[in-house]
Amino acid sequence: MERAPVSATGLVEINFDGIVGPSHNYAGLSLGNIASASHKGDPSYPRAAALQGLAKMRANMARGLAQGYLLPLPRPNSKTLRRLAVDPAADHGTERALLAAAWSASSMWTANAATVSPAPDTVDGKCHFTPANLVTMVHRAQEWKDTKAQLDIAFADTTHFAVHDAIPPSFGDEGAANHMRFCEGHGSPGVEVFVFGRPGGRFPARQHEQASRAVARLHGLDPARAVFIEQNPAAIEAGAFHNDVVAVANERVLFAHEEAFADQQGAYEAIRTAFPALEVVEVPSSAVSLAEAIKTYLFNAQLLSLPDGCMALVVPEECRESASVWAWVEGMLAGNGPIRHVLPVDVRQSMANGGGPACLRLRVVADPATVDPRFLLSEKRAEEIERVIASTWPEQIDPSDIGTASLAEAVRSARGRLLDALDLSQLG
Ligand code: SUG
């Protein structure tokens, strides 16, 4: 198999996907996330969800790309239940929603786990991580300490990595979902772009400008190579609760919807000033409306550099089912642009909660030899993960199952089996 190009420093992009946890369910917890709201109360299929995610990881590994994973967090979260004084058997109203929050498998969306600044961008030459505080949503605000515990193990080598605490509230930080990096190659110095929202609209602006600026300072970025741009309030209003619902970047390419940014041309200019080689692939609203882009998650894609030097876009299957999106994709492929392949993937269980292929992964640039191997996927580990999921993940969860002692026990024991299989029981 051809391997991903290794830079002179041994740095490659490693995608760390979140393994979908055994309590995956549809509780309608995320205001402003249209898929989450519209699937509220549907039965969920955690086993199928986790296997879909694993198949995506395996497909990328088979393309010769380095692949890692992060583990599901402990659920139901007894600390959250205790701190909010929630009755574990609450059966209606706000208390029921808080109960569901403590059961959420939302850590699967690792694009919100942290912001990552690779070593070539930082003043001390280390790769920096800041876990996202996710303070806007109660079910997500409980994630960061347990996420950090995993980052501390996976990236324990302090000669190469620095893992910070989350930015304190009240500045909301949602991590890599609102961060893009431009570079000539993953191992060369990059320009980092932070996209924030301004509060005041119908839906929460989940990324605060001051959180983005604090992350850039913490990571020791060169101010001339850190760019801050505002997300289009109309995009947030239409359901783009993170920038990665309307834009994605890889190396010198920005793939964005025409209505992604508050000042579209100003945003391109600001990036180009710091990174003159910028190549923009813009999808006009006349070809794909903002609503259709959000429904299909065309931009919530993995834009990958393949070992042969081509770029491929891994999009949700839903894109192929949309006449306007697929017509645009076919036209784009027939042209001479930088994106040479478009590869649909089935992550429907995650999509129904507003999480596409890009939400499910955290991009890290590192030499795999410096990462704790227990977080790196191999075919053997994929088989073990698959075995545990197939034998212990609940097949179906109905809304009324949330809060029951029997499901709590099944979920805890399934996660425990996975930790044991991966020799990570210390995360207990
Ligand atoms: O935070 N959905 C997640 C989806 C996160 C997508 N991530 C990126 N765009 N990078 C969210 O809104 C729904 C949970 C529920 O309703 O049960 C949820 O949390």
Image: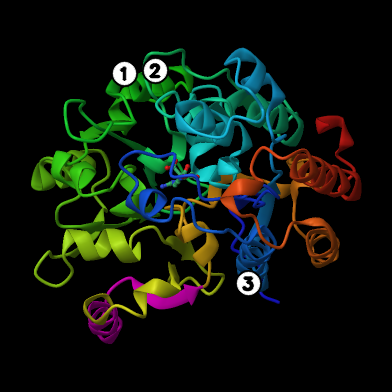
Quadrant of the displayed image that contains ligand 1: top left
Do the CB atoms of the residues marked 2 and 1 lie less than 8 Å apart? Answer: yes
User: On the image, numbered disc 3 is attached to which residue?
Assistant: 59
Do the CB atoms of the residues marked 3 and 1 lie less than 8 Å apart? Answer: no
Q: Amino acid at mark 2?
A: Ala
Earlier sequence position, callout 3 versus callout 2:
3
For label 2, the SS is helix
Image position of 200 with respect to 372: above or below: above
Q: Which mark is residue 214?
A: 2
| Percent x, y of residue 282 | 19, 62
Q: Residue at x 59, y 62 (%)?
A: 5
Q: Amino acid at mark 1?
A: Gln
The span from disc 3 to disc 2 (Cα, nearest Å) is 36 Å
The boundaries of the magenta stretch are 326-345
Quadrant into which the N terminus falls = bottom right
Considering depth in this image, is 139 or 220 the residue closer to the camera?
A: 139
Considering depth in this image, is 403 or 218 the residue closer to the camera?
A: 403
In the picture, measured across the screen, residue 174 lies left or right of residue 52, that is: left
Work out whether residue 133 can be spotted: yes
Q: Which mark is residue 210?
A: 1
Work out whether residue 160 can be spotted: no
Quadrant into which the C terminus falls = top right
Earlier sequence position, callout 3 versus callout 1:
3
Considering depth in this image, is 212 or 80 the residue closer to the camera?
A: 80
Image position of 318 with respect to 30: above or below: below
Label 1: few (<14), some (14–19) or many (≥20) C-alpha neighbours in 10 Å: some
Q: Residue at x 18, y 69 (%)?
A: 288
